[in-house]
Amino acid sequence: MRFVSSVAALLALLLVAVQPASAEKRLALVIGNSSYSGTAALANPTRDAELVADSLRAGGYAISHYRDLTASEMRAAIDAFIAEVGRAGPEALSVFFYSGHAARVAGENVLIPVDARRSSAANLRQQALRLNDYLRRIGETQATRNVVVLDASRANSFVANGQDTIGLARIDKDLLTKARTYVMFSAGPGRIAVDGEGGASTFSRAFAKHIRVLPRDLQTAFTRARTETASATDNKQVPILWHPRSAPVVEAADSAPPSKSIRPRLRSGDASSTVGETPQPRFPWPPPRASARYVIPRDIVLGDTTNATWGGVEARLVAALDSAGYFDRSVYFVPSGFAIVTRLERIDADGNPLAEDDRWPPVIGATGTFSLASYISRLFFAETGYYRVIAFIAAPRAFVEGREPPTGPEATEWVRSGLNAVPPEARNLHYSDDFTLTALIYEFRHEGGGVGAELLLPGRLPGRAHLERGRIITMLSN
């Protein structure tokens, strides 16, 4: 074992205005296992760990960074880290990053130490460290903000028959909820990650880059790393995020289960919609009353594409949103159509997005029993100013907005409750001539003084002006 660094410090860093300035304690355990005695050495994990540790350290985390740990050393490092998190109490934000070999054995994920030997599945479970055990133990602490990042989606030869060892297994969402933990994989379940070039994996390099910029917002950092990784690998590797309330919130596109049906059954009176036989989230209908709206011209929506399908329109809109910096969004169904909703952002008095570090309020964390809506209502509107959520509605008929506007927590919850993409079963549905793409803008103002955020009705700007300020129209027109 080589212990790279251990820093124990109380970080006087501001998370949000409603918390004391010295409240949050950022703690990280980073392990990179490369030099395996039972198989060929891995080229990237130690470098992966170095990059991530450096970025977390720059973001104010107290780092415990190790490389090439045996089973006993891994257990000791994890024991010490969990004890440190426990001492930090509810103010702790804990991050556990691991790069190396892992395996799915009997439906569970195990992290493999460097002294593990090829054996039966039962023996490997004894040699390795079970991820579920870590999740249970971190859940027993008072920490309310926990993250696990695994760059370990590899094929390995540690299990004698090899049947269960390709990639990683799905995460039990009930366990995540109890552990109050987000789990991030560098590739989808049962998939293998790309090693990349330059001594570090494609995912770890991207993740380290983005957490250096956004140390307070690991979910957005992951979303950006996911987009960058998928692009760099031609979608051969799509990272995945498992959410403690409804895992996964960012699902790998190629891991979706097949469906027997093609045409979605969409009825406005249903509590939920379905694609094939799988229930899908549905946007409130009729849509809540908005601050402003804008019907995007069809020639801008379709551009030069001849692929007038749901998937084609989604791809153009997503590309424009990515280019404009809206990496975090969710997809819903509406009667005979779909909706794409952006994450809540902070804007200035003229409707322009704030600088990147201030634009996206942090989303990871909760207090007590995990309730995202109450957490968001407590944090997102802690700072005074203006906020914006944009819902793009693609539907074949005109609609009238409802009379009741959404509350701030409801609007912020939208982006957490939907899908990450239009399901494969719906992508080839025809985007017919009667379809329109309407942007509904929900603009909130918070003036402080103990008063909650209010929806501006009408808004301060026309709908198109909001899209121009956010650079969405510009990107969509390119």
Image (spheres, helix red, strand yellow):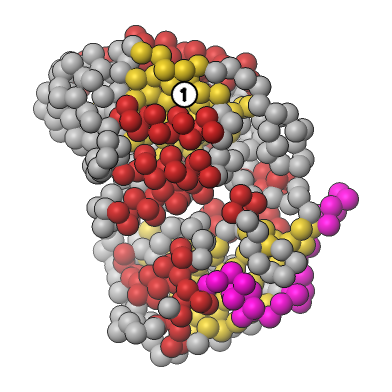
Q: Is residue 163 left or right of residue 186?
A: left
> What range is drawn magenta here?
447-472
Q: Residue at x 41, y 68 (%)?
A: 319
Residue 271 place in picture, x, y as percent:
54, 63
Residue 459 is covered by the magenta coloring:
yes
Tell me the quarter of the image containing the C terminus: bottom left
Residue 444 forms part of the magenta stretch: no
Please name the residue shown 54% across and 33% down the image: 58
260 sits to left or right of 366: left
Would you say 18 lies left or right of 296 here? right
Q: Quadrant of the N terminus?
A: top left
Vertical relation: 111 (above or below) 77: below
Q: Position of residue 180 (x, y in %)?
A: 55, 33
Q: Is residue 227 above or below residue 395?
A: above
Residue farthest toward the left in the current orientation of the protein: 161
Q: Main secondary structure of the magenta part?
A: loop
